[in-house]
Amino acid sequence: ILFMFTSAEDLSTDVITPDERAATRPPILMLDDFEYPGSGGLQYPTCTLSQPGFTFPTSGETESRGTYFLDYAFLSAMAYESSAITNYTLDTWFGPNVMKDEVDFVGKWREDSGTFLSPVQFKLFSLTNHPGFAVVSIRGSETMWDWIQNLQLWSAAGLSQMVKWIIPYGWIFNPILPDFIQAVNLIESKKISEVSYYKVTTRFVNEVTAGYSNEYGGGNFENLKVTGASLGGGLAIITGAQTSAYTVAISGPGATLSRRVYDPPITTDALNTQVFNFIPERDYIARLGGRADLFQNAQCLAPKNDLFGCHSMWRSVCELNYKCGSNGRPVFCRCVESFGYPEPTALGNRTFAQACQDASTAWFEMFPQK
């Protein structure tokens, strides 16, 4: 761990774009003639986020209606995909021309800001019928350097939490844990500090909300939300708290214990009022760093012997899709095939197996494997 803090290499050699990863991902098979009505006893109280600040309008809807938590989870997953895929999935999920993947706008900002070679990847999804609204979605861990970022940002917090849990009466150390973590991070090398992923995403949000524009648009994205899953969720928590942008994270490591380490430091008030985190049971990664006040504990169907099975972005999407209900959104074949959820209710004459087979055939016709 000390090596990760005191040394760094040129991270630009490990930049992996969504287009380069697209061929290795499973297809996103969505069905609009099936539904989940919402099941399994009580729904989560946060299935619809209605607190001002966390909501955004979609086609024909007002911000006051609230925003489905599922929409944030879906957008966090789209950070991993190429623009060719998101053009299809966004239209399928929200309806035609409701959301746009601003890939050219983000690319030009990265060129203008000199951050094009930074390994951190993120997308900006604008709401075409509601100027000024957009969602920044930050990609989670995929490369070796992504995992090094995880260590750099959360290893000290994880170590302090482990010590607290092991020793008797460890809770008495809670007041000094942020000071301990700050001291540990003093050994962090300047080079690693300069390439911290959150500095790029925080700069992007600050500059865009301040009026940055280029030939691909912008200048009016004054109402930005932030989301992400896993490492992307942790980065979203940091960026949201630093920029006052309301944030919804999926399985994001927390920033409460490490709040003084970041540049600029984060206040507990920002974490407790502007950041929301979805934390499945037995998701040990999401418990790193300490929880702020706004979070949703969730169930997980992964086998008990699968240590990291609950730290799954798509499993969380499926949990929200099933438990909260699809509410007019499509359902996913992978929820049944990969994660063990019940088959959704048919709205037409096709069987679920046939519908997924048809969706798979259509997917590979649109996106043939290279």
Image (tube, grey):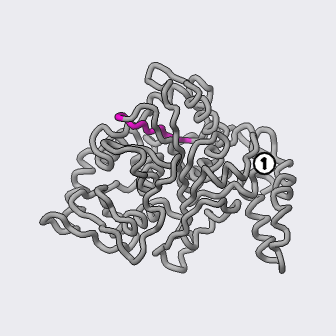
Quarter occupied by the C terminus: top left
Q: Which residue is drawn at 57% across and 53% down?
A: 233
Question: Which residue lies under the disc numbered 1?
Answer: 261
Left or right, 162 with respect to 150, comes to right
Apparent side of residue 79 relative to residue 270 in the rendered image (left or right): left
Amino acid type, mark 1 = Val
130 lies left or right of 160? left
Task: Decide which of 282, 26 is in the foreground and name it.
Answer: 282
Task: Decide if residue 159 is in sight here.
Answer: yes
Residue 122 part of the magenta-drawn span? yes
Element marked by disc 1: loop
Q: Is residue 25 left or right of residue 353?
A: right
Q: Main secondary structure of the magenta part?
A: strand
In this view, 304 is above or below 229? below
Q: Position of residue 247 (x, y in %)?
A: 56, 49
- Could you tell me residue 304's position as x and y percent? 53, 80
From which residue to which does the magenta span run?
A: 121-129
Looking at the image, is 129 positioned above or below residue 67? Answer: above
| Residue 356 at x, y percent in the picture | 24, 62
Is residue 196 or residue 207 the one in the foreground?
207
Q: Residue at x 81, y 47 (%)?
A: 188
Residue 62 place in picture, x, y as percent: 37, 44
Q: Quadrant of the N terminus?
A: bottom right
Furthest residue to the left? 349
- Residue 20 found in image quarter: top left
Whether residue 32 appears in magenta in the rendering, the answer is: no
| Residue 278, quarter of the rendered image | bottom right
Q: How crowded is mark 1: few (under 14 residues within 10 Å), some or many (20 or more)?
A: some
